Image (cartoon, rainbow, N blue to C red):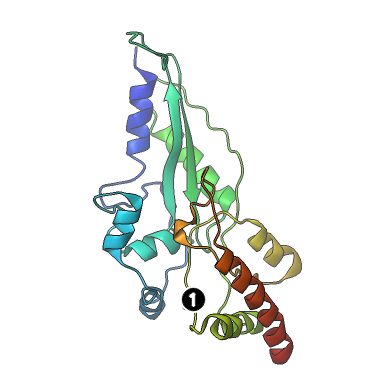
Amino acid sequence: MANPINELCKMIASLVDDQGHITIPGFYDKMVELTQNERKALNEAPFDLKEYKSDLDIHEVKGEDGYTTLERAGIRPTLDVNGIWGGYTGEGAKTVLPSKAYAKISMRLVPNQVSEEITELFISHFKAIAPPSVKVSVTPHHGGEPAVTPTDSTAYQAASAAFEEAWNKTPIPTRDGGSIPIVSLFKQALGLDTVLMGFGLDSDAIHSPNEHYGIFNYLIGIETITLFHKHLARLS
């Protein structure tokens, strides 16, 4: 019999090629490609690759060929295994063949990809690449739609002015991969774009057991939000 863990690993490995390109047919068909000027502006954000690798304690970065680390993190879709298990995982050795194998897989989407469509593409492809020796079952969990806030809106201009006044720095618009599906829902239901104003640092260890937040950032964040409302009233 085939070892389901071995086969699952092979199937998952085939989902991304050696160039970091996702191999699911149709996956990239609807996505919006940024212009060279937009990519150039994105890469003007302060970024030190050596410091980045040191902070993450890694020797090298990896991702889709032809894109910078900032672009891979903010403007390109991804496919990642979030967890994988099966067979005997207790203490000591046990030379048994498992009957089942499991994995949790997520895909970060970008405009104009649609979560339900991507889910169907994934299910169809994953079942198609399964060898005859295994049975495949895919259970969708949830999906969130991608969203990008325009930088020419009144709200964005107000936020930019608020940051500049509070921090004495002109903010650089950037994109980041995250999971905040309410942003796209606000756009769909209310027709409103969301302005995301962050005051944390990369070193804050968000969602970890040691998550923390500097008091200075907390206080100046309050000031920035107050200034945002002032500038929004001025510009509206």
Q: Nearer the viewer, residue 180 or 197?
A: 197
Q: Quadrant of residue 129?
A: top left
Query: Which amino acid, mark 1?
Result: Pro
Q: How many marks?
A: 1
Q: Is the C terminus in the top left, top right, bottom left or bottom right quadrant?
A: bottom right
Q: Quadrant of residue 15?
A: top left
Q: Is the N terminus in the top left, top right, bottom left or bottom right quadrant?
A: top left
Farthest-out residue, front: 215
Residue 110 at x, y percent in the picture: 50, 60
In the image, what residue occupies the spot 63% across and 77% down? 224
Q: Residues within 10 Å of mark 1 (few under 14, many from 20)?
A: some
Residue position for label 1: 173
Residue 151 at x, y percent in the picture: 55, 80
Q: Quadrant of residue 152?
A: bottom right
| Residue 75 makes an appearance in the image | no
In the image, what residue occupies the spot 70% across and 78% down? 226
In the displayed structure, 57 sits above or below 140; it is below
**Does 179 sit left or right of 31 as displayed?**
right
Residue 201 at x, y percent in the picture: 48, 62
| Residue 65 makes an appearance in the image | yes
Residue 44 at x, y percent in the picture: 37, 77
Farthest-out residue, bottom: 234
In the displayed structure, 193 sits above or below 202; it is below
**Does 32 sit left or right of 37 as displayed?**
right
Mark 1 secondary-structure assignment: loop
**Does 205 sit left or right of 155 as displayed?**
left
Q: Nearer the viewer, residue 121 or 9?
A: 9
In the image, what residue occupies the spot 36% across and 33% down? 11
In the image, what residue occupies the spot 53% across and 63% down? 200
